[in-house]
Image (cartoon, helix red, strand yellow):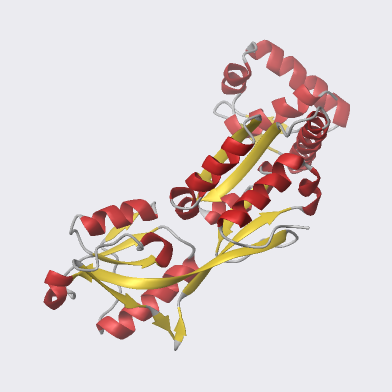
C-alpha cells in the first residue's frame, strides 16, 4: 500500500462519490475505480458499497479508513521529524483552535511565533471545541475550551468568569429584550439557562442563536439584545454604556477553562514545542520541560 492509496480512501470517505474524489485528487474517475478495486483486493474486503447516489462505508471499510488515517498521521510525523534535522526550526504546524480563542488570544500568539520562526508553515483550523476534539488526530496541537481531552496531555491556560451584559439605558426592559445565544456544548448552555431562569424569573428562551461568539458580541454592541459572555470577550466593552453582572450557578462562579492539548509525542517536533513555549510565555505561564 502506498501513501497515495491511503489518501484516496480518506478522500472517498469524505466525498462519498467517485467523481468528487477524482476531481479533488486531479485524476480520472476510471483511475479511481481501478485503484479502489486494487485496494479492496489487497485487504480482502469491500470497503464501500456502491449505490447510484453515493458510496456507503462498510463496517470493515471503516476499520480500513481508520488505519489509513493513522498511517497518514505517522507519515506526516516522520516527514516533520526529517525536516527538523536540517537546522532551523521549520516544517508544518497544524493547529485546531476554538473559535473564541482564535478570535482573541491566538492572533497575537501567532504574530509572535511567525516572527520568531518564519520557516514554519501554519495550518490553522478554527471551530467549535467539540469539532476540534472530535478531529484531534488531524492536529499537532489543539486549543480547546470546556473539558480537557482524554488520553492527551492538557496544559491549563486560563479560566474565564462569565457576565450577563445589557445596555444601561435599557435596564427596565430586560425581560423584553431578546437573549442572544452563541453555539456551545449542552452542559454550558444548561448552566446559562439555569442562571437566566433564576435571576430573570422567567423561562429561558434564546430568540437569537448564532454560531460564533464574535457575532453574539457584535449584536450586543448594536443594541439588538442581551447575552452572557466570557471575560475574555468583554475586556474592551464601554462600562459607561453596558452593565455587566457576574454569573453564578448554584453559588459557584460560571467559569470555563481553556487548555492546550496534545499528544506528548508531538513535543519531539521543534515547531510544536516552540509554539507551546511562545503561547505560555504570552500568557506568563511557565515553559514546558
Q: Looking at the rendering, which quadrant does residue 150 occupy?
A: bottom right
Left or right? Give the position of 166 relative to 132.
left
Q: In front here: 93 or 60?
A: 93
Q: Looking at the rendering, which quadrant does residue 113 occupy?
A: top right
For the point 61% across and 29% down, the residue is 51
Quick one: quadrant of the N terminus? top right
Residue 135 percent coordinates (x, y): 63, 47
For the point 45% across and 76% down, the residue is 254
Residue 109 percent coordinates (x, y): 54, 47
Q: Looking at the rendering, which quadrant does residue 200 occupy?
A: bottom left
Quick one: quadrant of the C terminus? bottom right
| 106 versus 69 height, above or below | below
Left or right? Give the position of 167 relative to 39.
left
Q: Is residue 123 visible?
A: no
| 107 versus 31 height, above or below | below
Q: List the single residue furthest toward the bottom.
A: 251
Amino acid at each position: 500500500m502506498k501513501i497515495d492509496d491511503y489518501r484516496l480512501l480518506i478522500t472517498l470517505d469524505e466525498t462519498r462519490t467517485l467523481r468528487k474524489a477524482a476531481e479533488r485528487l486531479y485524476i480520472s474517475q476510471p483511475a479511481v475505480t481501478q485503484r479502489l478495486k486494487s485496494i479492496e483486493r489487497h485487504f480482502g474486503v469491500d470497503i464501500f458499497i456502491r449505490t447510484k447516489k453515493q458510496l456507503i462505508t462498510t463496517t470493515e471499510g471503516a476499520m480500513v479508513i481508520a488505519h489509513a488515517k493513522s498511517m497518514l498521521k505517522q507519515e506526516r510525523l516522520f516527514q516533520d521529524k526529517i525536516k527538523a534535522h536540517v537546522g532551523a526550526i521549520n516544517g508544518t504546524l497544524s493547529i485546531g483552535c476554538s473559535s473564541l480563542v482564535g478570535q482573541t488570544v491566538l492572533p497575537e500568539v501567532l504574530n509572535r511565533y511567525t516572527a520568531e520562526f518564519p520557516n514554519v508553515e501554519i495550518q490553522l483550523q478554527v471551530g467549535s471545541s467539540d469539532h476540534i476534539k472530535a478531529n484531534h488526530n488531524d492536529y499537532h496541537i489543539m486549543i480547546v475550551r470546556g473539558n480537557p481531552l482524554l488520553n492527551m496531555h492538557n496544559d491549563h491556560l486560563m479560566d474565564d468568569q462569565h457576565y450577563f451584559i445589557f445596555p444601561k439605558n435599557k435596564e427596565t426592559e430586560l425581560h423584553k429584550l431578546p437573549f442572544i445565544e452563541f453555539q456551545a456544548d449542552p452542559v454550558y448552555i444548561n448552566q446559562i439557562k439555569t442562571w437566566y431562569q433564576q435571576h430573570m424569573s422567567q423561562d429561558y428562551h434564546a430568540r437569537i442563536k448564532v454560531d460564533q461568539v464574535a457575532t453574539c458580541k457584535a449584536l450586543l454592541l448594536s443594541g439588538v439584545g442581551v447575552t452572557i459572555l466570557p471575560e475574555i470577550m468583554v475586556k474592551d466593552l464601554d462600562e459607561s454604556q453596558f452593565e455587566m453582572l457576574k454569573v453564578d450557578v448554584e453559588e459557584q462562579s460560571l467559569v470555563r477553562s481553556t487548555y492546550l492539548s496534545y499528544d506528548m509525542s508531538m513535543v519531539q517536533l521543534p515547531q510544536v514545542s516552540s509554539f507551546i513555549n511562545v503561547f505560555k510565555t504570552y500568557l506568563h505561564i511557565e515553559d514546558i520541560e
